[in-house]
Image: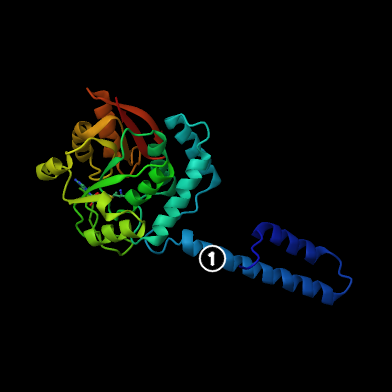
Amino acid sequence: MPNSRPLQPLGRRLGRAARRPATADGELHARVNALEKELRDARVARYTLELLFDSGHDGRKGRMPTKGSVDTLVAQVEAATGERDARPHVVAAFRTLVEVELRGVGRIAGGTPNILGKLTVPPLLDPPNDDVLEIGTLYGLFSAALTRQFARAGRRSSLTIVDPLADVQLQPGTANTADPSGTPVSEAVVRTNLELAGVPADRVRLHRGFSGDPAIRRAVSDRPYGTVIVDGDHSAEGVRADLEWVEEVVAPGGVVVVDDYGDRTWPGVQEAADAHLAGDTAFELVGVASTSAFLRRR
Ligand SMILES: C[S@@+](CC[C@H](N)C(=O)[O-])C[C@H]1O[C@@H](n2cnc3c(N)ncnc32)[C@H](O)[C@@H]1O
């Protein structure tokens, strides 16, 4: 690993070296050459980190959050969960996100703070059982990462996943073009990702179809879920229908994640969730972290 000192201090050192009266030209040149080499090595190290975490060239989002965005998220997680010091949990979630996404194919949808919130809050809210329902999985990587996060709390999750797995991401009103990652949205890819993340096949039920399909609902409604992720159809109508149904399948005390709540790209999500919460419902809003809302069933 090349010596990768921070660039700014190195730049200041170069400036100081150039300003200092040289006792001998040779000594000054040697010093400048050494500092130039150090700068080149630092750039190589930084570029390697960018390829791993911030490439932006393969359809994945950068995974190099600012300290400020992590600080904000920590405060939001603490407010949503009552945890006095959520920072270690957020840091552990970051490691999970990076590891699962690097190992897998495709991508986890969304920006880093939002994913960290969705990975940190559900285990801290201590749901009443280990059955997790995810509506809308894309590549299966978020479910895989959440399973890892529950494992950190000593819990062994069982996953039920519903998604049309239609080669591309389906969203009403959007073009439904190929994913920027270049990987097809398919059952084979989801199963591969879950295997790569170490989720045992016998703890996964994959239902290919839409959450509004009565046959899918019948098959999935065979148990009360401790945790439900609502991340499928992002239209107001789609979220409204999902929340109405989820209210029937979530266990008392269960946790519901409403993804992309407050995200300006998907205004229908907050519109439908707010309307649901204002009505006759057993859900209460326990908090918002980044662009996810967390509900608890009374
Ligand atoms: C935003 S992506 C899910 C991202 C994933 N949860 C993650 O964190 O990486 C939405 C997924 O939901 C699927 N979808 C759309 N409408 C759906 C519906 N009615 N029921 C289930 N899945 C749906 C899309 O095709 C897509 O695969």
SS state under label 1: helix
Q: Position of residue 250 (x, y in %)?
A: 24, 33
Q: State which quarter of the image contains the C terminus.
A: top left
CB at mark 1 closer than 8 A to ligand 1? no
Image quadrant in which you'd find residue 222: top left
Res 151 seen here: yes
Q: Is residue 20 left or right of residue 77?
A: right
Q: For mark 1, what is the residue?
A: 47
Name the amino acid type tagged 1: Tyr
Q: Nearer the viewer, residue 50 or 252?
A: 252
Q: Position of residue 295 (x, y in %)?
A: 32, 31
Image quadrant in which you'd find residue 61: bottom left
In the image, residue 18 sits, relative to residue 280, either above or below, namely below
Q: Position of residue 99 (x, y in %)?
A: 44, 56
Residue at x 86% of width, y 66% of height: 21
Residue at x 35% of width, y 60% of height: 196
Q: State which quarter of the image contains the N terminus.
A: bottom right
Q: Nearer the viewer, residue 28 or 217?
A: 217
In the image, residue 275 sits, relative to residue 60, either above or below, namely above
Res 54 seen here: no
